[in-house]
Image (cartoon, helix red, strand yellow):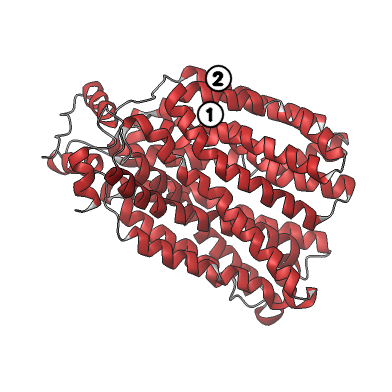
Amino acid sequence: MSVNQRVGAGKPGTSGSGQDSPEEKSGLRKIVAASMVGTIVEWYEFFLYATAASLVFGKFFFPNAGSELDGIIAAFLTYAVGFIARPLGGIVFGQIGDRLGRKHTLQVTIILVGAATFLMGCLPGFNSIGYWAPALLVVLRFIQGFAVGGEWGGAVLLVAEHSPNKTRGFWSSWPQAAVPVGNLLATLVLLTMSWILPAEQFLGWGWRVAFWLSAIIVVIGYYIRTHVSEAPIFLEARAQVEAEKAISYGVMEVVRKYPKGILGAMGLRFAENILYYTIVSFSIVYLVTVHQYNTSQLLLALLLAHVVHFLVIPQVGRLSDRFGRKPVYLAGAVLGSTWAFFAFPMFDTLNPVVIVAAITIGLCFHALMYAGQPAIMAEMFPTRMRYSGVSLGYQVTSILAGSMAPIIATALLQQYKSWLPVAFYLVIACAITVVAVVTLKETRGISLREVDAEDARKHGLEPARVAG
């Protein structure tokens, strides 16, 4: 029996029982694995690129930048190109995913992400081909960001739309847990390469191996994604759109009909995204520049914290199923606003155990928001435009929040010579998310078919017909 037949029979994601049979759990695990691999590739590449930009790319692609620091800045500007491309990818792949399906879209995005990452490891340097080297790096980085912009929405919706109503928070949190797994793999590869190779060899060719290894995950991920099926609720919505030409879908439709939903999704994302980048990026800047802390020890601290982050995220997903989406998310936003006030004094101790504890606590606060995002956002939009809605809310905010957070925090530290302004920056971000959470309605346990039916009533459409 196929996954689609199994899900259609028991109707996970649509029934009110929320009871996961062994057969349902087996099928869901396959879908979760298919969703997670793309996220692992995405965050493996993220951490890898950021590290390579600070260690290698400045000298390799921008040797004539004036100074070493100028070269690093130029390399980080190419990194920012990926953030700019993400909303565009979200729009394009959101439209395709709402029209043709989540599965095939995810097969395309994982190939694009993997190919761009692999080719980065093949690029010649400035000394070989001149300005073509940084130009090609920018092109590949844009392709990465473009593909990643469509990856997240499809990955989480593939799980959310297959999940039983009462356990959607738990199952759809697993793609989120893939984030620390990707960071873990990148950290392990970088640490291993730096341990077994002399510095000259690592800078000369060793860094390329880390980029080439992404191909292994891509091949595995693509294979897994060929063996899953679309959720029945999506197939019904697609059939409805095809049968009734007056019914629209995708990006423009969600902007017209659900602007409040997009703004709500952006508000949810705002503090979570800023908190995460403050923890994993600015913490390193603070410890290295203020205290000249050992970089290898920082990588190990992040590695340990990411292990805990991975273990905590699915459990927080369970909490959102039990106590509701809003209370758990609200707890994360409130606790997140307090993190900097005790974390930076903990950093100032320079005690490795205390530093690991500070980072780990921050990532646990982050998990209270991050774990529930797929379920909450999936429950905010009807199926015919869900991919576009969640992609817009998620990816546009990454420019306004996450990509700017380390820059703003570093500028505040430079201007005021203190971490206190950074702490108040986090408070403001969390206050925005608190307002967003309070204004949302609680959707724990809701049927996605109820969301579609409400959309049909609101806009005078014929409800989607239930297959079989």
The residue lying furthest to the left in this view is 468
Which residue is pictured at 68% across the width and 64% down the height? 190
Left or right, 209 with respect to 318, comes to right
- In-image side of 282 versus 115 (left or right): right
Residue under the point 53% across and 29% down: 267
Which one is earlier in the sequence, the residue at label 2 or at label 1?
1
Give the residue pinned by disc 1: 267
Please give the label number shown on residue 435. Answer: 2
Report the amino acid beneath label 2. Val
Quadrant in the picture for residue 343: top right
Marker disc for residue 430:
none
Residue at 80% in and 36% down? 412
42 on left or right of 279: left
Which residue lies most toward the front here? 22
Q: Residue 69 falls in which quadrant of the image?
A: bottom right
Image spot of residue 461 (x, y percent): 18, 28
